Image (cartoon, rainbow, N blue to C red):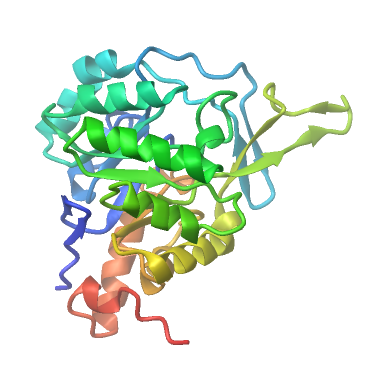
Amino acid sequence: MVNLAVNLGGIAMKNPITVASGTFGYGQEYAALFDIARLGAVTVKGIRACPWPGNPLPRHAEVPGGMINAIGLQGPGVEAFIRDDLPFLAERQVPAIVNIWGTSVDEYAAVAARLTGVPGVAGLEINVSCPNVKEGGASFGTRLDSFAEVVRAVRAATTLPILPKLAPNVPDVRPFVAAAQEAGANAISLINTLPAMAVDLETRRPVLANRVGGLSGAGIHPVALKHVWEAAQVAEVPLLAMGGVFTAKDALDFILVGATAVAVGTATFIDPLAPLHVLEGMEQWLDAHGVADVAEFRGSLRL
């Protein structure tokens, strides 16, 4: 048997597989299909201080190589999440990584503080890179000064492990990795969706009500792989990688270039069991290639 256990900046995971925020709800949605405790962690949808309706419909569209979404971080707010959703994850003893966001630095800090000490919360993924909201999100994550300010504020507000989620639409992710580490990040999450658009030729209108959204799916995997490889060159903390993971090979690509853990996202819309299939295929490949511990394989890319 291959030892798949990893530590993601203080989050103990039985294996390197989690799910991408926004693709797995709050865990209950998939629990009827498989035992979610088999995952290394569950990363939940974005949570802010208050309930948030998200963007108007239509807000997702299939495109070649993936999908574009403009959900807009719809969520119940932190209090309802703690009351209605978190107990389910805590009972199953699966680490919950809570994706947090806000429209101000103070809101990020307030949400982080509220989740501190709550049973079941294993860490906070700081969403400073969502392209689908008009305030917050990528408006913080694409400017180095504001990015660092948010990470510092969250670090000061919580003792939980924190993972800033990096935006892909920057010239170079490495300065953001360095800034995150300096501001107190325990790990780094990357990448978020790529800004994108789809139009309808017959109506001559944008397909999405929000006009633009975020591209995810198999088509962005090479982009994500480049970002993770570059981040690993300067990272002193673990990396949580995501972007176009549909197969075990996709996940192993990320670990090969230096990631500690991997999130499965858009693939779950095609196959709800995709996270398990990726996990099982990863273990089989490592075993077949004589790798006794996934840590031996991490960062072993030959240049």
Residue nearest the viewer, comparing 293 with 282: 293
Residue nearest the viewer, comparing 120 with 292: 120
Residue at 23% over, 49% down: 39
- Is residue 120 shown left or right of residue 139? left
User: In which quarter of the view is residue 151 placed?
Assistant: top left
Estimate the x, y position of residue 169 in percent, counting from the top left.
61, 49
- Is residue 28 shown left or right of residue 87? right
Residue nearest the viewer, comparing 41 with 112: 112
How many numbered circles are shown? 0
Q: Using the rendered image of the protein, determine whether residue 249 is visible from the camera's viewpoint.
A: no
User: In which quarter of the view is residue 97 placed?
Assistant: top left
Estimate the x, y position of residue 297 in percent, counting from the top left.
29, 77
Residue at 65% over, 40% down: 62
Q: Is residue 123 above or below residue 247?
A: above
- Is residue 136 shown left or right of residue 209? left
User: In which quarter of the view is residue 262 placed?
Assistant: bottom left
Estimate the x, y position of residue 273 in percent, counting from the top left.
36, 47
Q: Is residue 192 above or below residue 233?
A: above
Residue at 46% over, 21% down: 74
Residue at 24% over, 34% down: 156
